[in-house]
Image (cartoon, grey):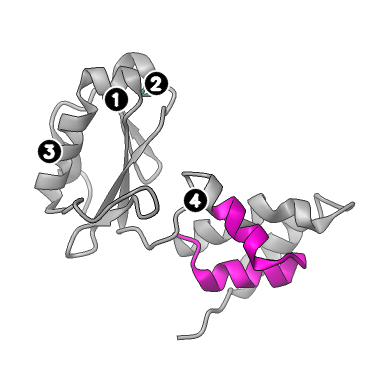
Amino acid sequence: MSFEVPAEVETKVDQRITHYPVSKRSAVLPVIHELQHHFGFISEEAVEWIAVKLELEPIKVLEVVTFYPGIRQSAPGKFHIRVCRTLSCAMAGSAELMDALCETANIDRSGTDHHHPIAVSPDGKFSIEFAECLASCGTGPVCLVNDDFHEAVPNAAELLAKYD
Ligand code: FES
């Protein structure tokens, strides 16, 4: 399947590039965000497309993609969960929350590592990864489900039941 950026997404990309009149290469991060917003992740094809668009070597784009934990390199599920694992949330039970979410969503995280942090449920409905501080340290454990923020999550099953 060939990689294609829809015209409306490319228009948004072009608009973002206009914010960097001195060097369009400086638009690499906003352009990555625009493509991730549309595709859900940054594929190898997306890296190549961005490189051509910004007249960069693909490795320069890949360096940015691999540097920021918020940029995904594999496809997430319909609902992507990010569980904070930084100190306050860790002390409040983020590891237990992760285990409960995985059990509820039937997600196997055994194949994840630093380079492949995302695990997806067999039905593709949920995906999950650990995240660093999500800026609500007093209300842990906290997680994001897509753009929804959840604090002091008491019950994984109740949380996931909200997503269909
Ligand atoms: S430590 Fe979890 S939100 Fe800051």
59 within the magenta span: yes
Residue 109 placed where, x, y %?
A: 20, 51
Residue at position x 30%, y 28% in the image: 142
Image quadrant where one finds the N terminus? bottom left
Alpha carbon separation for disc pair 1 and 3: 15 Å
Residue 163 placed where, x, y %?
A: 23, 49
Viewer can see residue 32: yes
The numbered disc on residue 151 is 1
Dot 2 and dot 1 residues touching (CB under 8 Å): yes
Q: Which residue is mark 3?
A: 100
Name the amino acid type tagged 3. Ala
Q: Nearer the viewer, residue 17 or 70?
A: 70
Q: Is residue 81 above or below residue 107?
A: above
Quadrant of the rendered image holding ligand 1? top left
Alpha carbon separation for disc pair 2 and 4: 21 Å
Q: Is residue 99 left or right of residue 48?
A: left
Q: Give the mark nearest the N terminus, 1 or 3.
A: 3
Name the amino acid type tagged 1. Glu
Q: Nearer the viewer, residue 19 or 48?
A: 48
Q: Which residue is mark 4?
A: 71
Q: Residues within 10 Å of mark 1 (few under 14, many from 20)?
A: some
The numbered disc on residue 136 is 2
Residue 59 placed where, x, y %?
A: 63, 63
Q: Quadrant of residue 10?
A: bottom right
Q: Quadrant of residue 54?
A: bottom right
Range covered by the magenta-colored residues: 41-65
The numbered disc on residue 92 is none
Cβ of disc 2 within 8 Å of ligand 1? yes
Cβ of disc 1 within 8 Å of ligand 1? no
